[in-house]
């Protein structure tokens, strides 16, 4: 079940730049993301305050930087609510993957530089491990972007810049890689269970994890299976079985089969 761990960086130590002193940080939003970031910050010895939305202003007044870990629709409201803390608060960011810096306009209008920092990692709870993950950053000016990079790296992540106008496309890619994978595997497990086989998730997990690890190592060269080897007869048998057992999965299978076929053909053409 831990197959993918071989691909995680083992040298995710903060760079010399990231080890520079960081300003006092208020993490506003005590849910999964806020809790995980606060935990990582405390482990790094950073000066950090974690507060829910009701205590956001009080926490922001004690910090130079604030990171809003709230639902996308609440970012502008919280940015407005902490306006009285600017200054000494001078940097205000959010952790949304798809939202632009425009949501932080109320803070920017009060004179704060704005940024975003989105961990490219699934965060199911406040104990989620962020070390070794990447994080997408954006800044309203060079100082804000540099702060976001330093903060991400100090927390053990690899920071990379995403233009503000391309954040939605970036987040769509992240959702496809993570959320859609879960949906696909649940569909596969459900199909297996309809054949009368128990413990479908436990049986499929080694295949899924090894496949993901091979993709991480080799990219599209990790592709195997009937489509990769040009076995159209097996694909037709799959579709016939789906029409009988799980007809709602036929469109999904056909779409993914076509994408897989194009990928396999592109690899053959490149040889």
Image: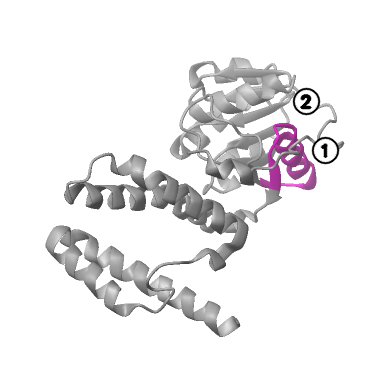
Q: Position of residue 121 (x, y in %)?
A: 55, 41
Q: Position of residue 237 (x, y in %)?
A: 22, 71
- In the image, residue 17 sits, relative to residue 23, either above or below, namely below
Dot 2: element = loop
Q: Is residue 15 left or right of residue 244?
A: right
Please report the residue visible at 62 percent of the width from the left and 17 percent of the height from the top: 59
Please report the residue visible at 66 percent of the width from the left and 41 percent of the height from the top: 115
Q: Position of residue 151 (x, y in %)?
A: 72, 34
Residue farthest toward the bottom in the current orientation of the protein: 269
Q: Is residue 99 left or right of residue 24?
A: left
Using the image, tell me which numbered label, if any, was put on residue 40.
none
Magenta residue span: 137-159
Q: Earlier in the sequence, mark 2 or mark 1?
A: 1
Given this view, does label 2 or label 1 mark the residue nearer the observer?
1
Please report the residue visible at 73 percent of the width from the left and 25 percent of the height from the top: 64
Of residue 190 and residue 38, the one placed in the foreground of this image is 190
* C-alpha separation, residue under disc 2 versus residue under disc 1: 17 Å
Of residue 93 and residue 1, the one placed in the foreground of this image is 1
- In the image, residue 268 sits, relative to residue 40, either above or below, namely below
What is the crowding at mark 2: few (fewer than 14 residues within 10 Å), some, or many (at least 20)?
A: some
Find disc 2 in the rendering and name its residue: 23
Please report the residue visible at 58 percent of the width from the left and 58 percent of the height from the top: 166
Question: Is residue 158 within the magenta segment?
Answer: yes
Using the image, tell me which numbered label, if any, was put on residue 15.
1
Q: Position of residue 104 (x, y in %)?
A: 59, 40
Asked whether residue 81 appears in the rendered view, the answer is no
- In the image, residue 178 sits, relative to residue 270, either above or below, namely above
């Amino acid at each position: 079940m831990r197959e993918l761990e071989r691909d995680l960086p083992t040298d995710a130590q903060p760079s010399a730049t990231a080890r520079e002193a960081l300003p006092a940080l208020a993490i506003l939003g005590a849910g999964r993301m806020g809790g995980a970031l606060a935990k990582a910050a405390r482990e790094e010895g950073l000066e950090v305050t974690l507060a829910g939305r009701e205590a956001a202003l009080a926490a922001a007044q004690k910090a130079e930087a604030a990171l809003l870990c709230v639902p996308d629709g609440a970012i502008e409201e919280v940015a407005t609510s902490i306006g009285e803390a600017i200054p000494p608060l001078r940097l205000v960011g959010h952790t949304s993957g798809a939202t632009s810096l425009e949501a932080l306009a109320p803070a920017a209008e009060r004179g704060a530089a704005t940024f975003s920092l989105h961990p490219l990692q699934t965060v199911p709870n406040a104990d989620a491990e962020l070390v070794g993950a990447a994080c997408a950053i954006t800044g309203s000016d060079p100082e804000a972007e540099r702060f976001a990079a330093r903060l991400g790296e100090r927390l053990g992540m690899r920071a990379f810049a995403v233009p503000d106008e391309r954040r939605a496309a970036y987040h769509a890619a992240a959702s496809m890689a993570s959320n859609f994978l879960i949906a696909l595997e649940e569909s596969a497990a459900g199909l297996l269970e309809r054949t009368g086989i128990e413990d479908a998730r436990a049986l499929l997990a080694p295949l899924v994890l090894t496949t993901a690890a091979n993709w991480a190592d080799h990219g599209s060269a990790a592709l195997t299976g009937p489509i990769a080897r040009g076995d159209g007869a097996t694909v037709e048998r799959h579709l016939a079985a789906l029409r009988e057992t799980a007809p709602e999965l036929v469109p999904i299978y056909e779409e993914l089969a076509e994408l897989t076929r194009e990928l396999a053909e592109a690899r053959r053409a490149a040889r």
